Image: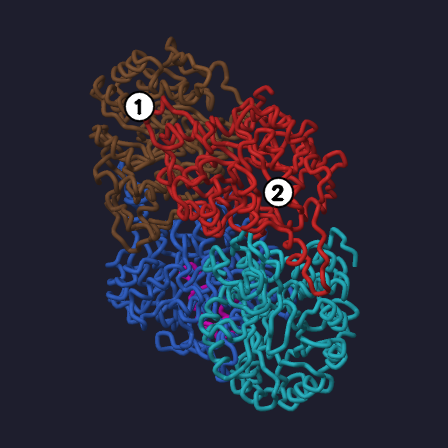
Chain colours: A blue, B brown, C red, D cyan
Amino acid sequence: MPDHPSFLSLTDIADMASRHWGRALTAHVEEGGGEDQTRRANEAAFDRLRIWPRVLADVRQGHTALTLLGEPFVHPVLLGPLAYQSALHRDGELATAEAATAMDAGMVLSTLSSCSLEAVAAELPARKWFQLYFQARAEDTLRLVRRAEAAGYSALVVTVDVPVHGPRLRSQQAGFAMPEHVRAVNLAGMSAAQTHYLQAQDSVIFQGHMASAPRWDSIVWLQQQTALPIILKGILHPQDAVQAKKLGVAGVVVSNHGGRALEGSPASIAVLPQVRAAVDDDFLLLLDGGIRRGSDVFKALALGAQAVLLGRPQAYGLGAAGALGVAQVLRLLREELELTMALAGCATLADISAACLVNPNEFSAC
Amino acid sequence: MPDHPSFLSLTDIADMASRHWGRALTAHVEEGGGEDQTRRANEAAFDRLRIWPRVLADVRQGHTALTLLGEPFVHPVLLGPLAYQSALHRDGELATAEAATAMDAGMVLSTLSSCSLEAVAAELPARKWFQLYFQARAEDTLRLVRRAEAAGYSALVVTVDVPVHGPRLRSQQAGFAMPEHVRAVNLAGMSAAQTHYLQAQDSVIFQGHMASAPRWDSIVWLQQQTALPIILKGILHPQDAVQAKKLGVAGVVVSNHGGRALEGSPASIAVLPQVRAAVDDDFLLLLDGGIRRGSDVFKALALGAQAVLLGRPQAYGLGAAGALGVAQVLRLLREELELTMALAGCATLADISAACLVNPNEFSAC
Amino acid sequence: MPDHPSFLSLTDIADMASRHWGRALTAHVEEGGGEDQTRRANEAAFDRLRIWPRVLADVRQGHTALTLLGEPFVHPVLLGPLAYQSALHRDGELATAEAATAMDAGMVLSTLSSCSLEAVAAELPARKWFQLYFQARAEDTLRLVRRAEAAGYSALVVTVDVPVHGPRLRSQQAGFAMPEHVRAVNLAGMSAAQTHYLQAQDSVIFQGHMASAPRWDSIVWLQQQTALPIILKGILHPQDAVQAKKLGVAGVVVSNHGGRALEGSPASIAVLPQVRAAVDDDFLLLLDGGIRRGSDVFKALALGAQAVLLGRPQAYGLGAAGALGVAQVLRLLREELELTMALAGCATLADISAACLVNPNEFSAC
Amino acid sequence: MPDHPSFLSLTDIADMASRHWGRALTAHVEEGGGEDQTRRANEAAFDRLRIWPRVLADVRQGHTALTLLGEPFVHPVLLGPLAYQSALHRDGELATAEAATAMDAGMVLSTLSSCSLEAVAAELPARKWFQLYFQARAEDTLRLVRRAEAAGYSALVVTVDVPVHGPRLRSQQAGFAMPEHVRAVNLAGMSAAQTHYLQAQDSVIFQGHMASAPRWDSIVWLQQQTALPIILKGILHPQDAVQAKKLGVAGVVVSNHGGRALEGSPASIAVLPQVRAAVDDDFLLLLDGGIRRGSDVFKALALGAQAVLLGRPQAYGLGAAGALGVAQVLRLLREELELTMALAGCATLADISAACLVNPNEFSAC
């Protein structure tokens, strides 16, 4: 992909993707839950934070390397688990994996991948994690775990924030339907949902969906089934992070599912400082939600994350130009991160702290 | 009513109602007092509050049941007193009662009902309260009370916040006039207003309207006339709530009449915490004003209300599709409430508290 | 003037006036100084304040009467000094005086009146004050004072906030010029400005305009010339109010000249509490700037003003319908004030205090 | 240039310049870095500050004179270093110098001047400083210093905030390219950039651009080469200002390069109070970024700057009408400053302090 002026920013890439996708699919990607309160809060919260520039610093030895779960990472920008990527571009998750490899980025493959987890793994020499949705039947969950282990994924990222999905108003009104050929191929042959025989006064939510949702003891069970490190994705409350740590999980993704889980929940970046304060300095915290430029990565790291996951930016890149688009998104964010670090006088990620922000406590109604 | 995409949210339902109503009637329903400051404050105040999601909680036994005035309620969303409903839909309050019954919702019938209070009561097997406006003559007030008692209403909701109405600019400019056939049938034969002979320097407000307005001693008088529990509707100041409790009334509706009473008064949800702090934890507080989604119900309960009343959402449902429309509004709000509870880790209403909110004190100029 | 729906609010009246005036004159009336920061701040500051409604109060004896400088006033809404009113309506200040008389309002006549101060005085049986601009020559100033005394004005309101005027961008760009026939008739024969012979490096501002501007000792001089009470108009800083009181002037108008004096100065209502705190409770404080509805009058009184002056609202009324328009503006504001008092449980002006506001300290960047 | 109504404000002048320039060049001038967050923050921060008017003060001896680096200045508004001015107007920096001389303004000539530094110096009898960018080779830097000394510049302003430039999205998308004939003539024959041989894993930012960026020891080296006072331009962090002072430099320009350096850095005016508090009262602090009217100059001085630099306003003037345009910008700002001083009761710059502001600490997310 040439360095075309219109691909100089994520906005340009998102515009191109939107043209490729059309209205319905764009609505599907863009929408948050309900009326987008939380999605908008994610981005607005980043915009309020200000970074201190530092001048004349010596950053000639600068780099963005880090270690996550014992594995070296070249930079802290990971591709988060994004479902059904073949709907976004014909090459789907394989394209994303190609970009991850080219740009030295970690990648988290979704349970709802539209390419087989083995095929994607084959494209990824390193830094590959598998995102796990608990299935209706434990044996199905276990089958996914075994396949992920066998394919060489080095961690399980268990999503815990959407035991039940709220309505997706925008995409439904835009008439979005998942194309026939895009399927969760890794779940082939598995039971889609547990059957619940509801009583007359039973609630579809409480006695229906929530009856088969994972609980804390599900995590304990999972820990007993696998030696892979487990990361819980979708925690915002500090006490939930403390509980996760107490159980011995390897880390937590501070996330509100891009605003699609609980409508009205806070911006992930807005609660990150409280979460970091509740666990110790070494406990692994990742963040997603609202990362749109390299300075946002810097802000997330300043407030306590070790690394970040990309959601929509990844989709934009894929929709705009497949593997090249995702690679360009990664390149932009990494270069902007390096630029921010250089101008903030930070040679390494370890130099990034809350002291690098002018107003680290600037959160109100985010 | 089929689960049509355009009825997935209150916004869709309001749009449909507006198309049925035309400009003048829509203006009549939508307008707050004056320039809508307070009406807008109601909704904005909810939008600022953020809810903590909690993950992996066990809510399989979840439900929304509660007890109000000794009577079991299936959920905490009540249909508030809305006048002249036959202007909104030809079936008027009878349609609303049908929806209340179908969706197990409590209903408060307005003194200004366009259907007879007895006919509406006949549609409601339970959870029916009567909203009382003091009449110019005490005997008329008393006749209403006796009829409400006879018809089986189990509480009186006395509205106290509009002894005099401010101008309704938007509907007047839109040319709204109440249709001929829509009348306050329960007041047939009663004297519309007490005659005041004003002196030259008398004020139409003070010596006119306010001369026949109810005062605290009117409440005492009413308590002596009936054994029905009395709830005062339209209180915002904590000291007024304390005074109400001191008199022995059964509860208070924290309300600013949908922004139609005192222009410039605060959002009801913004003062609810102060009101709750001023009375004890058991005193019955209901809230209306600005409830537009299930998460708003959750927020109101978190800040101290036992239940909420719907105003405009009820009107939207009625205008959009009569009984089915009101039922859909109730269904949406209840399901959204259950979804919010499930994702906030609350199995019962008793689990909902200020600790469930990220920023329970986030009110500024609301 | 009939109670036409389009005259139910000040907005309607302003719209009508604007149609009568055309673009250039409307720009002249509407514009604040510079880019209107301060003018907008005036109105925004009122909008942030919230009033506590109080229910079931006994306000049957309610009224809006007060005493200012020993003279009884029926209500606290005065017509402020507005220059060149014949540009706004052919009847000019005589129409305004007629409305003041009809609606029992106090009126402050501008030095720059386009009708003679004696003719206007003849229309006003009571409650008439004269606004004084210091003239280039002391004898001219004195002549105005003597004429005001002779015509029966009972106080002098000395404007002190515009010793030099900033640019009026909007009206100049709109091509506004004062019509030939509209003149400051009271200044006929007086010297328009003192001649300053500036040196090469002299400043037009400091050595030019400000050389003939009144200073504190000018006020002392004026006090020696007249027995009329003197009110200083255009003070915002608490220490200036303290200085005024120390000199023995009768009162102060807290004002920023409708945003036309110092661009970037605060909203008058935003600093009123500080000014009131700096002088004692009895010292006369009036306020102008941003009063657009009766609830604004209430808010100004709650924060320490005894009464308010109208600027633009008066112009709107005059432009819309001459004397009848000004009368309607006064009627609207007085009725809205009474309505607000009734719903806030205040029977008299003395009952209005900061405790009537939910957020009396809600000022930020106003 | 006649006092045409459309040149009464900077907005008018900017509009005229924009018409002359066309879309691409206008985008080049207007854009900040990234998405303009910081650029917008600069202006928004000024708008929040409110100035206290003071009345009846004696300012007849008023003036705006000051001394900077031992040299008398008539007023505190300097023309900041603006690159490639021949792109903005055919007369380039020579026109700007003519305006500076006519309006007694100080001028800082950019290293990237499109006119020779000697030619510009010849136009400037006094108050001329030279802005220095460190060159790839020390001997080139030194040659610039020697020429500046020889030409009579009395200070070096070393820009330290853009060791590497972020993307300029708006101008690139608008298709802007610097015209062929506009060149950095003072750098003729110098090496544009040091050659870095990057390793495979090297970063273009850290091991590329930053390898040749100046560091604190570069400043020490420069101090050893010249007797001219050195001012560092582009410092926001108080500790960097302290470090600069400790090294013995003559002063600091608090600046974020018009929002073009580190995207997401704070408004310069927002951090000025912290910078002033960190150095002593006499240390020279200048400010640029967001100055758009005379009251902004006043606010900057109130918060601790001795003088301000103009960036974009200078460009607007040049684009609108060459030397006359720049002169008009200076005239407007100076007169507005004097007007503000007069109305704030300040006769001299020394009278301007934080006490002149209503809300000197009013900065949030700026």
Query: On the picture, is A180 further left or further right than C96?
Result: left
Q: Is residue B316 left or right of residue C323?
A: left
Marker disc for residue C133: 2
Residue A111 in magenta?
yes
In the picture, measured across the screen, residue B186 lies left or right of residue B227, that is right
Residue B124: x and y in percent read 30, 22
Mark 1: few/some/many CA within 10 Å (<14, 14-19, 20+): some
Name which residue type carries label 1.
Arg
Tell me: residue A97, above or below residue C288. Answer: below
Q: Which of marks 1 and 2 is in front?
A: 2
| Residue at x-position 30% and y-position 30% | B104
Callout 1: residue from which chain? B
Magenta-colored stretch includes residue A91: no
Name the residue beneath numbered marker 1: B215
Q: Which chain carries label 2?
A: C
For residue B313, say whether it is visible: no
Q: Which residue lies furthest to the front in this view?
A: C224
Asked if the residue at tag 2 contacts the one at tag 1, i.e. Cβ–Cβ closer than 8 Å, the answer is: no
Residue A77 in sight here: yes
Q: Residue at x 74, y 52 (%)?
A: D6
Left or right, A78 with reference to C327: left
Q: Of the numbered discs in the image, which one, if any, rests on residue C308?
A: none
Q: Nearer the viewer, residue C221 or A56?
A: C221
The percent position of residue C33, horizontal first and vertical second, equals: 62, 48
Tell me residue A346's x, y (percent): 46, 77
Q: Give the range drawn in magenta.
A: A95-124
How would you rate the neighbour count of disc 2 (Cα within 10 Å): few for under 14, some for 14-19, many for 20 or more?
A: many
Name of the residue lying farthest toward the top: B189
Amino acid type for the residue under numbered disc 2: Tyr
Looking at the image, residue A29 lies above or below residue D200: above
Q: Please, what secondary structure does the residue beneath circle 2 have?
A: loop
